[in-house]
Amino acid sequence: MNKVMVVTGGSRGIGAAISRMAAVTGYAVAINYHARADEADNLARDINEQGGTALAIKADISDSVQVKALFEEVKSKLGVPSVLINNAGITGKICRFDEVDAETMNSVIGINTMGTLYCSQEAVKLMSSKHGGSGGSIVTVSSIAARLGSPGEYVWYAASKAAVDAMTIGLAKEVGGEGIRVNAVSPGIIDTEIHASGGEPGRVDRIAPVIPIKRAGTTQEIANAVLWLCSDQASYCNGAILDCSGGR
Ligand code: NAP
């Protein structure tokens, strides 16, 4: 099987840790990004200089046409992917549900939910034995927000993640017999820029004391869980949603 991995939002935060670890594990990595080309290009250069193989590819995953083009480019430049990591995600600004605007909810659902559905569909078309593919693995970076609901912060984001959990369960059952395992990792609070983007740079420090483990998680801790789920060591995991949240 080709060791080619597509990591959406693979340029920063959790995605960057996944991209780096995948390269060390022997995958050729397609680092998808949307806006910050410098971050993606620097990471790809770094991986390539260290002897790995990485390619930065711009695509807004909320746009199905751009997602198709992303997979075409991966196929032609790196080979048919055997692993898709649905990682790209945004929260929108923290606020009460009755204050959030439609544009924010649309973009969060568009990226987190539709983007995950679009990318997973392209991956299934390439990986499924039903379509002549050699199988593979899809891992989605969800969130424990899907079960906590994020009241007062971003209920719409929680809803966008609950949808991808449902996709994980259903798609695992649909394509499990076609050589594809579909799983998810649900992080708790991880120290990345996503909290500042949501308007509360100090969110990690505010919430850390109520986490049973008493600290935020690291991007590497999530990458460890993601890489394990797509490895042969997790060969009997299909449809699993693995909490990685310090017990929250
Ligand atoms: P982050 O540091 O803000 O990074 C987000 C990544 O997504 C960037 O690479 C960004 O690319 C990319 N992205 C954003 N919009 C995109 C689009 N339309 N198309 C393609 N890529 C896009 O976020 P993070 O904290 O690492 O989060 C990664 C995932 O983990 C998300 O799904 C998030 O919901 C989930 N998660 C995070 C936490 C946490 O506490 N950090 C907790 C639970 C779940 P650009 O740089 O080009 O914008």
Image (spheres, helix red, strand yellow):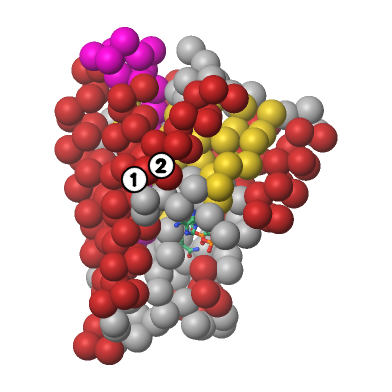
Is 187 positioned to the left or the right of 101 in the image? right
In front here: 179 or 81?
Answer: 81
Q: Which mark is residue 84?
A: none
Q: Secondary structure at mark 2?
A: helix
Q: Which residue is mark 1?
A: 64
- Tell me which segment is drawn in magenta: 127-146
Q: Position of residue 232 (x, y in %)?
A: 45, 21
* Whether residue 11 is visible: yes
Which residue is at a point 78% across and 42% down the rendered structure image?
A: 46
Q: Is residue 226 visible?
A: no
Q: Residue at x 29, y 83 (%)?
A: 100
Q: Amino acid at mark 2?
A: Val
Spatial CA distance of label 2 from label 1 is: 5 Å
* CB contact under 8 Å: marks 2 and 1: yes
Dot 2 beta carbon under 8 Å from ligand 1:
no
Q: Residues within 10 Å of mark 2 (few under 14, many from 20)?
A: many
* Quadrant including the C terminus: bottom left
Magenta segment includes 13: no
Residue 137 lies, in percent from the top left, at: 39, 28
Amino acid at pointer 1: Ser
Q: Secondary structure at mark 1?
A: helix
143 w.r.t. 178: above or below: below
Answer whether residue 145 is magenta in the image: yes
Q: Is residue 117 left or right of residue 195?
A: left
Q: Residue under circle 2? A: 67
Residue at image position (24%, 14%) is 130
> For the point 29% across and 35% down, which residue is it?
121
